[in-house]
Image (spheres, rainbow, N blue to C red):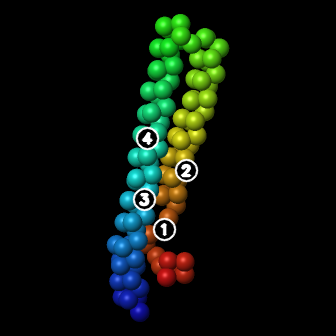
Amino acid sequence: MELIEEQVLKLIQKRYGTLAEVKEKKQKVDYVKEIQKLEDLKVAYFEKHKQFTMTKQAFLEKKSQLTKQIESLENRIVEEDKKEEGVPTDKLTRELV
């Protein structure tokens, strides 16, 4: 019975574990790309401010908004990492089967 459980676990991990890992990695990559876009936008707003095409107040408001969005995405990445660490992969559970 134990041998069967081990084989089933390996099959589940091989099939679904890798799909979940791919999705998580893709999601993390998407978050990192979005963070980079927001950082680039912050730089663009800073340049507009330095060229006097944007007021200081408007620049500070945009910068604050972008910073909040970046922090939110970074928190999502941290949460995904925590979820990944919390998944037991060495035992079969009723949810897996």
Circles 4 and 2: CB atoms closer than 8 Å:
no
Gap between marks 4 and 2, in whole Å? 14 Å
Residue at the spot 54% in from the left edge and 77% down from the top edge: 95
Do the CB atoms of the residues marked 1 and 2 lie less than 8 Å apart? no
**What is the three-letter code of the residue carrying label 4?**
Val
Q: Which residue is mark 4?
A: 32
Residue name at image x 54 percent, y 81 percent: 94
Q: Is residue 94 left or right of residue 16?
A: right
Disc 2 is placed on an element classified as: helix
Q: Which residue is mark 2?
A: 79
Alpha-carbon neighbours of circle 4 within 10 Å: few (<14), some, or many (≥20)? some
Please state which amino acid type lies under the numbered disc 3.
Lys
Q: Which residue position is annotated with label 1?
A: 88
- Residue on which the image places disc 3: 23
47 sits left or right of 63 in the view: left
**Foreground disc of the pair 1, 2:** 2
**SS type, badge 1:** loop
Q: Position of residue 38 (x, y in %)?
A: 49, 31
